[in-house]
Image: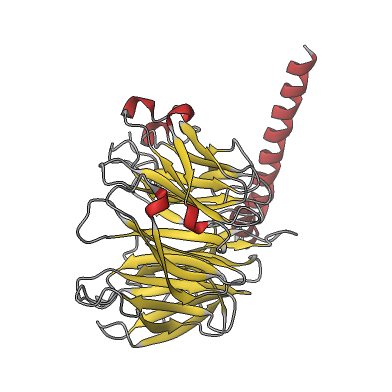
Amino acid sequence: MAGNSVALIMNISARSLNCLRILVCAGLAATGAACRQARAREGWARHVIDRSSQGADGVRLGDLNRDGLPDIATGWEEGGRVRVCLNPGPAKAREPWPAVTVGKVPNVEDALLVDLDGDGRQDVASCAEGRTRAMFAHWAPRSPKRLLDPKAWRTEAIPASRGKMMWMFAAPIRAEGKRGADLIAGGKGPGAALGRWRLPERARNPAAWHWRALRPVGWLMSLVIEDMNGDGRQDVLFSDRKGPRRGCFWLEQPGADAPEAPWREHPVGGEGLEAMFLSTADLDQDGLEDVVAAAKPRLILFCRRLNVSGDKWRVFPTRMPEEAGTAKAVAAGDMNNDGRLDLVFTTEQASHGRQGVMWLSYRESPFRPDWQPHAVSGVDGVKHDLIELIDLDNDGDLDVLTCEEARNLGVFWYENPLLEPRD
């Protein structure tokens, strides 16, 4: 009875608080400004996907069970777990998702879904920093019925990766002449580099994986694998936040006739700045793919592509609002369905009333610095990470998928309140 009484009091208190908020807003209806500000700081509804470990550090998408829905791989750094969450579909997206621990890796920093051995099923690769300083392959079970069985997954360290650097990030790249993908990866700290793992035809022999460094890095933040100059070969777009060569760049993959040739480097923007996570989008809708990047302490860089070959760029910086934390990641998408691309960003150090996730819209031009801020998270969480913009509830607007590490909010998504859910 005591527990029921406490619950009843809490419910009454919550309703009273909502009524008080409504009355205050009604009293200020003449201007409406205070109400809009209060709603903005509250943010969007947050739906927890996974909160089973500690220190969720990134959301990477793939389709593990081949049902056409995006699943999520996450490394839980403090908990030492590599986990995959299976998308249950729009009707159950607001509930915790079915999930599996595919491996236990201390200091895990990144995890991604990728078909390493070319068998048509996605495995998981992970990167570890700290004292672990290694990369790992997590081999998926042969039977689809055992995907959620942690005992059916097998974890192996990549021998040549041990002790080479603190590994931070990896991405698959197309490998000519074989079924499985190769990996582009890199790290941070002394001796860190961005490079390519050549996987043998029998990729389940990690001892045969071959590493080739392509470029020194101080602290690799992000990787995007795409054809940057239209020559049909996948290139490597990346951001480096530390050291003498920090900023945003892309490396041009040489032709098949010279596979061991150096990868030519092209600057994109933000040289000399502490560049954080980046992403690509045609922000100005001129037919050319641009780059947007977060840069500390509070900048978002719109790196406008000026030609198809990707060797000419112009940077338009925008300062993040003061009510936000410090820059972490940014992605572009039409958040209010007005036909123009907006910017969603995440932050670190969002404490003392600062907001961790916000979105920006422009009025006249994306080249102007006066973007208008809107809340997503409100005062919710301190250290958010990578962003994916995806309509998880199938209501016709983009939601925000991310994770939070410091307050241990886990992996979750913020529901865009623009439209009502579809039946």
Residue at the farthest right position: 2
Task: Where is residue 215? Give x, y as percent.
Answer: 45, 76
> Which one is in front, 371 or 257?
257
> How was this image coloured?
secondary structure
User: Seen in the image, is 257 located left or right of residue 354?
Assistant: left
Residue 148 appearing in the image: yes
Task: Where is residue 286? Give x, y as percent.
Answer: 26, 78
> Which one is in front, 333 or 44?
333
Position above or below: 22 against 244: above
Position above or below: 124 against 109: above
- How many numbered dots are placed on residues in this image? 0
- The quadrant the C terminus occupies is top left
- The quadrant the N terminus occupies is top right
Task: Where is residue 350? Give x, y as percent.
Answer: 67, 60
Residue at the farthest front position: 207
Q: Residue at x 35, y 79 (%)?
A: 263
The quadrant where residue 343 appears? bottom left
Position above or below: 222 against 87: below
Q: Residue at x 58, y 53 (%)?
A: 377
Q: Residue at x 42, y 45 (%)?
A: 124
> Which one is in front, 151 or 75?
151
The quadrant where residue 246 appears? bottom right
Task: Where is residue 138? Give x, y as percent.
Answer: 44, 42
Residue at the farthest top position: 1
Position above or below: 314 against 172: below
> Which one is in front, 357 or 7?
357
Residue 336 appearing in the image: no
Q: Residue at x 70, y 34 (%)?
A: 14
